[in-house]
Amino acid sequence: MEDLSLHIIDIVENAIAAKARRIEVSVVEEPGEDRLTIEIKDDGFGMDEEVRQRAVDPFFTTRTSRRVGLGLSLLAQAAREAGGKLEIDSRPGDGTKVKVTFQYGHIDRKPMGSMAETMTMLFLGNPDVDFHYTHVKGERSYTLKSEWMREKFHDQASVAPDAIQWLKKHLQEGLAGIGVKG
């Protein structure tokens, strides 16, 4: 995966498979500190210690549909290549938190990708999940919660054309307002 936003999609899909109903995605860009931090927290099933320890092994997966679990191992590798690391905090019944850091200006850091497109897809594709997205760049921040969209558009939040347009515009303008390209 070339863009970090694709890794976020993979982790969120894992959270949804673990029956998460609330997922928090946080991206913190600190150019002055030379650090990028991505954190995804969910309220899903969580993992026991053995599974948590093996989660970054590319030849381990809990899915029955495939034999390898490349997502977290590729993200851990991308973090190491860019002077960072991946941490997983999880307990059964307590959900999971994946935190990955990168050296912000490292030549090998993967590009962020389009967070507006990523979050639009996640919000619209999972209307029953309560998303909370925060993006911080330096001193500026942007937040979007799926509950705001549900309040504004009621039951039509994931299908009404005006709801979809509102979400895309809100994300693009909000991210541009803090100096983030899509």
Image: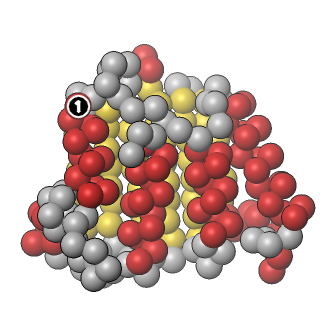
Q: Quadrant of residue 82?
A: top left
Q: Quadrant of residue 156?
A: bottom right
Vertical placement of residue 152 versus 98, above or below: below
Res 5 seen here: yes
Residue at coordinates 73% horizontally, 40% vertically from top-left? 172
Q: Secondary structure at mark 1?
A: helix
Tally of numbered discs: 1
Q: Residue at x 61, y 54 (%)?
A: 119
Left or right for 88, reference 159: left
| Front in this rendered view, residue 51 or 141 | 51
Q: Could you tell me residue 25's position as x and y percent?
A: 49, 54
Taking the view exactly as shown, the residue that stands out farthest to the front is 66
Q: Residues within 10 Å of mark 1 (few under 14, many from 20)?
A: some
Residue 158's x, y, as percent?
75, 71
Quarter of the image holding residue 164?
bottom right
At x 80%, y 46%, the residue is 169
Figure check: 101 above or below 10: above
Residue labelled with disc 1: 81
Using the image, determine if residue 155 lies above or below residue 165.
Answer: below
Visible residue check, residue 47:
no
The percent position of residue 103, horizontal first and vertical second, equals 31, 26
Depth check, front residue: 104 or 6: 6
Give me the residue at 63% from left, 30% from top: 181
Residue extending furthest toward the right: 162
Q: Nearer the viewer, residue 1 or 23?
A: 1
Residue type at the position of mark 1:
Glu
Is 105 left or right of 128, judged from the image as shown? left
Residue 50 position (above or below residue 58) = below
Q: How is the image coloured?
A: secondary structure
Whole-percent x and y of residue 118? 58, 52
Q: Tell me: 93 left or right of 43.
A: left
Quarter of the picture containing the C terminus is top right
